[in-house]
Amino acid sequence: MNPDSPTRLCLDGRALTDNWRFLKTQSGLVCGAAVKADGYGLGAREVVMRLRDAGCRDFFVAHWGEAAAIANLVPPEQIAVLNGIEADDIGCARAIGAIPVLNTPRQIALWKAEGGGRAHVMLDSGINRLGIGPEQFSTDMFRGLDIDVLMSHLASADEDVQQNEQQLALFHKLSSQIVARRRSLANSAGIVLGSNYHFDLTRPGLSIYGGIPHKQYSSHIRPVAHLSARLLQVRDLQTGEPVGYNSAHICRKPTRVGTLSIGYADGYAKSLSGKGTVLADGCILPVIGRVSMDMITVDLTATNDVGEGDWVDIAFDLPEASRISGRSQYELLTNLGKRFDRRWM
Ligand SMILES: *Cc1c(COP(=O)(O)O)cnc(C)c1O
């Protein structure tokens, strides 16, 4: 017996592949996919199968465990492990056959000492987070490496700032001194910056999953994740009565209050307390009071036709939810919890 979950996550496989195809077209035709963090919280295996069937050939994960989880779905050499290698990863790396992204002189030396083979290399062109920066750079260290993708990562591609051009220029300067099959710079937001940023391969993540880093995308990228939850209880409260923890909401009028089976443990951000909305019976209804671990409370007064046991759609427009919650679109997606009944459509 598998009990039914009162919390549903409907995943639109068509929107996922359409988003990827749009990004591919925008990229000048060679486009990979970041599927780290379990496919941005949506389920890496389901995502990889669909993108593979749509023609994607380059998948990026962060950890070796994430590579192992998808390794039987695509040829392992199509999987790149962004966080690179430690000595104790080598056995696993060889067994899986995914390709490490070498991020430091030490990782390069280790890979060579362990017999080498095909690898990717990350140059740091100004994000100063991970990758070989200009201060560590020497052409010597790359000698003898069999480099497939030579890449770098943009720090502020979602903003119109000079840093993008500076990173582009530094990436040109450093990468032109190294032999590699392919070069790659742009994430989702970077694709919008134009063909100068596309090189041989782009690496979008967020926008495949419906995230909108730039207004230019809003009419082309469709949401993939749709949340709904069951209405557990409906009650009528009088003016002055409190709702939820710490009485954060006090009814200013007679209010029909509904309690829905979704909470912050499902990734419904606590900062949506008193700010989020749900959709039922053709009405947009406000979330009132605090978001609890397993429940939210909503003002149903405007509806006639919603009762206990009904399913209610949770508004989860990523740019809007991000704006009102103060959480990034990335956090909203990757925090989606494990309790959902996940249904791919
Ligand atoms: C996560 C990641 C991406 C994808 O970035 P989005 O902003 O989600 O499109 C691309 N490249 C690297 C190195 C990453 O870590």
Image: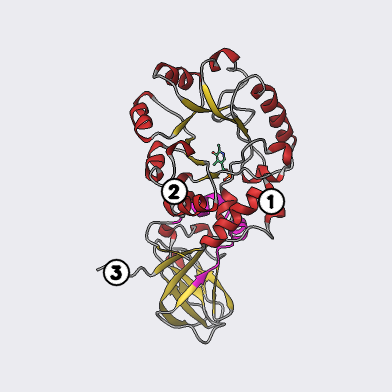
* Image side of residue 262 versus residue 278, left or right: left
Region of the chain picked out in magenta, as a range: 313-336
Q: Nearer the viewer, residue 111 or 40?
A: 111
Secondary structure under badge 3?
A: loop
Residue type beneath disc 1: His
Residue that badge 3 annotates: 3
Q: Nearer the viewer, mark 2 or mark 1?
A: 2
Q: Position of residue 200 (x, y in %)?
A: 64, 36
Asked if the beta carbon under badge 1 is closer than 8 A to the nearest atom of ligand 1, the reply is no
Q: Give the side of residue 324 with respect to residue 117, left or right.
A: right
Location of mark 2 (residue)? 38
What percent of the width, then of the height, locates residue 228?
47, 69
Q: CA distance from mark 3 to mark 1?
A: 41 Å
Residue neighbourhood size for the residue with mark 1, other residues' Cα within 10 Å, grouped as few (<14), some (14–19), many (≥20): some
Mark 2 lies on a secondary structure that is helix
Report the front residue among 144 and 269. 144
Q: CB at mark 3 closer than 8 A to ligand 1?
A: no
Whole-Å distance between the Cαs marked 2 and 3?
24 Å
Q: Answer whether residue 327 is visible to the viewer in this image.
A: no
At label 2, which amino acid type do we have?
Asp
Residue 29's disc number: none
Residue nearest the viewer, comparing 187 with 284: 187
Look at mark 1 in the image and give the residue it sits on: 214
Determine the CA span between mark 2 and mark 1. 24 Å
Name which of mark 2 and mark 3 comes first in the sequence: 3
- Residue at 68% over, 30% down: 167
Please tell me whether mark 1 sits on a helix, a strand or a loop: loop
Q: Of all residues shown, which one is farthest toward the top?
A: 140
What residue is drawn where x is 56% and y is 23%? 132
- Residues marked 3 and 1 touching at CB (< 8 Å): no
Location of the N terminus (image quadrant): bottom left
